[in-house]
Amino acid sequence: MTTQTTSRRARTTGIATLSGLAALALAIAAPLSASAHVRVDPGQASPGGYTTLTFKVPNESATASTTSLTVDLPTDAPFTSVSYQPVPGWTAEVTEAALPEPIEVGDATITQAPVSVTWTATGEGIGDGEFQLFPISVGPVPDTGSIALPAHQGYSDGSVVDWDEPLGDDGSEQEHPAPVLYVNDAPPVDEHAGMAPMTAGSDGSGSGSASASGSGPDDLGALGLGFGIGGFVLGAAALVLAGVALVRRRPSASGAAGAGTAGR
């Protein structure tokens, strides 16, 4: 009787442990889907200079590929110069338009400026589990707090995901957050942490890199991916160990029961 009770307790303990580990694995892996946003790197820049901004675009559909990306540029504090770096398999177009109001830049009055950049795939685009980088050079960086850069991600099935939501009142990130370039404002604690601003090079192009000691969004995403995979591996290992333990205990319990019967 004691042996049977011990066996039942062992099975119950194994199941409870497995359930707990599985729940932990799911909790760790859950934030991964939320981290797959359109991001801009670097997330900070100094006013007055030129900088290179790179938009990282992951594909979030298992059935469709990303075939276009449009990034809206500011019109209240515009970049007067925008150029793009060619991306193999994609065409790019910078669209200029009249500004809502004229802008004074030094001694010049600016009435028209770049308002968007659009990349269009010439092939299959960005497939499931893939991402693409889209760099542009912009400047001079306006002397302002922060600059929202809404992005519109088009898919081969005709759907469009708008990454244009501002941060919540409490600073929390929304479901489809807009990429943001911080100039004079400090970024949120978890937004582009550790990224160094780009500075203007002697040729007028952006130069600089993320801090070697910091961790940007890509580092945080990789860290989250590592935790998620580790959680699933931990859950699978627990399942195997629990199964092995139960198999090993069953012969022992049967043997003990047989010995007790023989003793009678």
Image (tube, rainbow, N blue to C red):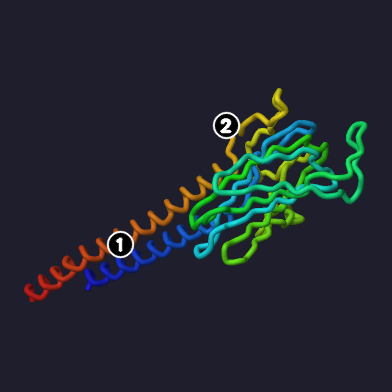
Which residue is the site of mark 2? 213
Name the residue type under label 1.
Answer: Ala
- State the SS at label 1: helix
| Vertical relation: 174 (above or below) 145 | below
Q: What label sits on residue 208 in the rendered view?
A: none
Residue at 30% from the left image edge and 65% from the top image edge: 10
Tell me if label 2 and label 1 are in contact, CB under 8 Å. Answer: no
Q: Quadrant of the N terminus?
A: bottom left
Count of numbered tags: 2
Residue 86 shown left or right of residue 188 in the figure: left
Mark closer to the observer (2, 1): 2
Residue 199, position as x, y percentages in the image: 71, 29
Residue at the far top: name it.
202
Quadrant location of residue 14? bottom left
Residue at 69% from the left image edge and 33% from the top image edge: 197
Name the residue type under label 2.
Answer: Ser
Residue 195, position as x, y percentages in the image: 64, 36
Q: Around disc 1, counting alpha carbons within 10 Å, would you say few (fewer than 14), some (14 to 19), or many (20 or more)? A: some
Residue at 36% from the left image edge and 66% from the top image edge: 15
Residue 105, position as x, y percentages in the image: 88, 35
Residue at 50% from the left image edge and 52% from the top image edge: 130
Q: Around disc 2, counting alpha carbons within 10 Å, would you say few (fewer than 14), some (14 to 19), or many (20 or more)? A: few
Quadrant location of residue 240? bottom left
- State the SS at label 2: loop
Q: Earlier in the sequence, mark 2 or mark 1?
A: 2
Q: Quadrant of the C terminus?
A: bottom left
Viewer-nearest residue: 12 or 89 = 89
Which residue is the site of mark 1? 242
Residue 232, position as x, y percentages in the image: 41, 57
Q: CA distance from mark 2 to mark 1?
A: 41 Å
Residue 10 shown left or right of residue 256 in the figure: right
Residue 98 shown left or right of residue 154 in the figure: right
